[in-house]
Amino acid sequence: MRAILSEQERERLSQLVTEAERHTAGELVLVVARQSARYGTSRVTWAAVTALVVSALVDFIWPTIPVLWLLALQGLLGVLLWWLFGRPPLLRRIVPAEEQNRAVNSRVKQLFVERGVTETRDRSGVLVFLSELERRVEILADRGIHEHVGSDAWAEMVRIVVDEIRGGKAAAGLATIVERIGRELAAKFPARADDTNELPNQVTTDEG
């Protein structure tokens, strides 16, 4: 799967985060993941059922094939299909949308804690999480800035990025909301003389 952001785009977004944080005591973190879960159950289920159906068809068409050959065919086909269903375009289609949503939502909450977004001085951390396989974006904000911006505004920012992803312009969508979040943070938490950079500005990768 081709990366949704090039190295140049990641560098540009990192620069935008740095620029946004010059005007605020708040913190903005961007994380990009290849996928939010392995979806092993879906892969195994689809591989096993498909291999069973194919083996049954082969047995129906060529009933003289020995049973051991059919079992070997089913096993080899199951392994091949398990690998095949792990390819992003197919995996995205076999996993129910609700399961993908749950996986992304669960992962962003984990990262919110793991990346220290909950530990900023003013409770002003914002995490923007993009999961490539699922083509989903989540924004999670700490209490201080969430109360200022509100759920509807965050949802609108997510829609902006998702629309740009569908048009093949993920970097443009992220750049738009980085600048907008920067303005919101600056309005609520303007820069102070004793500010320190509490969290990394670089776009980071989540390997799960």
Image: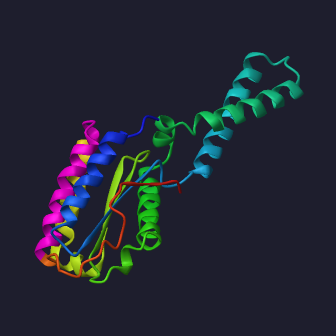
Could you say where residue 96 lies in the image, as x and y percent from the top left? 46, 49
Q: Residue furthest left?
A: 187
* Residue 117 vs residue 201, the one in the foreground: 201
| Residue 110 percent location from the top left of the image | 47, 69
Identify the residue at the far front of this view. Answer: 193
Side of 67 relative to 16 (left or right)? right
* Residue 114, position as x, y percentages in the image: 47, 71
> In the displayed structure, does residue 183 sit left or right of residue 33?
left
Residue 5 visible in image:
no
Residue 206 pos. (x, y %) = 47, 56
Residue 182 colored magenta? yes
118, above or below 13, in the image: below
Q: What stretch is highlighted in magenta?
A: 165-187
Mark count: 0
Residue drawn at 46 percent across, 63 percent down: 107
Specify the principal SS of the magenta part. Answer: helix
Quadrant location of residue 157? bottom left
The answer to whether 38 appears left or right of 71 in the picture is left
Residue 138's quadrant in the figure?
A: bottom left
Q: Quadrant of residue 63?
A: top right
User: Relative to residue 183, is residue 57 drawn left or right?
Assistant: right
